[in-house]
Image: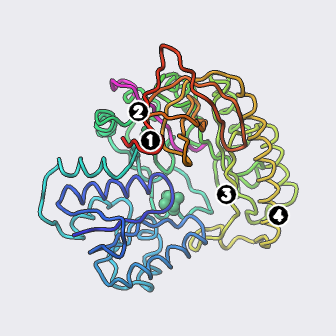
Amino acid sequence: MKVYVEAYGCTQNYGEARLMQEALLRSGHRITTEEADADAHVLVTCTVVETTERKMARRMAELAAYEKPFVVAGCMAAAQRDRIQSIVPRAKLLPPRKWPQIVELLGAGTACGDRAAEIESTSFGWRDAIVPIAQGCAGRCTYCITRVARGRVASYPIDAIVAEVRRHVERGVREIKLTGQDTGAYGLDAGTNLAALLRAVDAIPGEFRVRVGMADPLTVHPIQDDLVDAYASEKVFKFLHLPVQSGDDGILEAMRRQYTVSEFEEIVRTFRRAYPDITLSTDVIVGFPGESEEQFEASMELIRRVRPDIVNVTRFSPREGTPAATMPGQIVGWKVKDRSRRLTRLRFQISRDGNERFVGREVEVLVTEPGKPGTVLARTREYRQVVLREPATIGEFLRVKIDGARATDLSGHVLTNELYTPVQIHAGSPVV
Ligand code: SF4
């Protein structure tokens, strides 16, 4: 069968969608990027906020209209089974933890073996590797539907993760993204931790870089020193995605985040002491039920004080089945929007100022993907994005000089010295 797979949501969901495609290829199916051309459809859903859920519902109805075998996978298949069944009653449901069963759901085709799968998976144009390290999280957040969808922490064994990373490195991938709902929770169910995993990955021979996905302050705080040590590896991007969600302890308590603002700041200080240029990314929810103007101001003040490089601003959206959906003090839409705008404005000012300090520096980058026509995109050791207007090969390490900064990225030019002679391949063409 020619199978069409469409995914939404976080890196983990995309990673699982890729794994499903590889599994389907291994069992003899083909993958198509044309939905009208497919013999079967798979929608890998996300339900993090209400607008996403509405989009998923629309796509379900559109894909079901082809009247071909249809699988709804991803988080909605665990958290909103009834909703799916009311929209597309004949769809088969595949919750996140059960993704390997995609092959059984669609029925095996004519097996052509692993080699065909390997060749096809490299031709999809994936230049990075997404490696899920665990399912679920250790939290009890009152607003989060993901907890319903993904459940408690279940870590994949270190050996299995190392073997997966090695497989990607051996086929030439240079950027490895370790993902999970909370990478800091890795190993809580298995007597190990994220630092141990990073050390094991660091021991894999080869030139590659690892980006560690979102890690909650709750789970990072107890292992911060160990983690800072493990980050010393050349292979680990100095990038920390540490979602604080609010700058007010009262709101954090109502969210049941189980850490304080000062614990968050302590983690940031610990990492910055070791890696002063580390890229700090955080998330803030605005308009949580009961959030007063002063409590929102506390979030603004925290962002002014900590100056994260990236702030992902989310407007609170009540998710059915979560305690926050029925909490008193729900905030009217216009107020939530206004807070979101104010925080976003501040976030961009801070990002621009932060990036400007890199102008004039010479840094090492890894070329990661094609950019707009005539450009390629690269990442610094701190995972800052650099736009290069010169030909460069995806997967190549270069020395560049930063000559411009915006809120979202840097620009630079390649320093052609004897150590780093760029290979002349045009932007946009090479694929790992
Ligand atoms: S884990 Fe959360 S963000 Fe990721 S796909 Fe599921 S609902 Fe969306």
N-terminal-most mark, 4 or 3: 3
How far separated are the C-alphas under marks 2 and 1? 10 Å
Q: Which mark is residue 255?
A: 3
How far separated are the C-alphas under marks 2 and 4? 42 Å
How far separated are the C-alphas under marks 3 and 2? 29 Å
Mark 2 Cα-neighbour bin, 10 Å: few <14, some 14–19, many ≥20 = some
**Amino acid type, mark 2:** Leu
> Residue furthest toward the top?
418
Q: Nearer the viewer, mark 2 or mark 1?
A: 1
> Mark 2 touching mark 4, by CB under 8 A?
no
Residue that carries the numbered disc 4 in the rendered image:
338
How far separated are the C-alphas under marks 1 and 4? 35 Å
> Mark 1 touching mark 4, by CB under 8 A?
no
Estimate the x, y position of residue 377 in percent, counting from the top left.
54, 40
| Above/below status of 218 relative to 210 | below
Q: Is residue 45 magenta?
A: no
| Above/below status of 196 relative to 253 | above
Q: Secondary structure at mark 4?
A: helix
Q: Secondary structure at mark 2?
A: helix
Q: Which residues are magenta?
A: 202-217
Residue that carries the numbered disc 2 in the rendered image:
197
Mark 4 Cα-neighbour bin, 10 Å: few <14, some 14–19, many ≥20 = some
Q: Is residue 148 visible in the rendered structure shown here?
A: yes
Q: Nearer the viewer, residue 404 or 145?
A: 404
N-terminal-most mark, 2 or 1: 1
How far separated are the C-alphas under marks 1 and 3? 26 Å
Q: Secondary structure at mark 1?
A: strand
Q: Secondary structure at mark 3?
A: helix
N-terminal-most mark, 3 or 2: 2
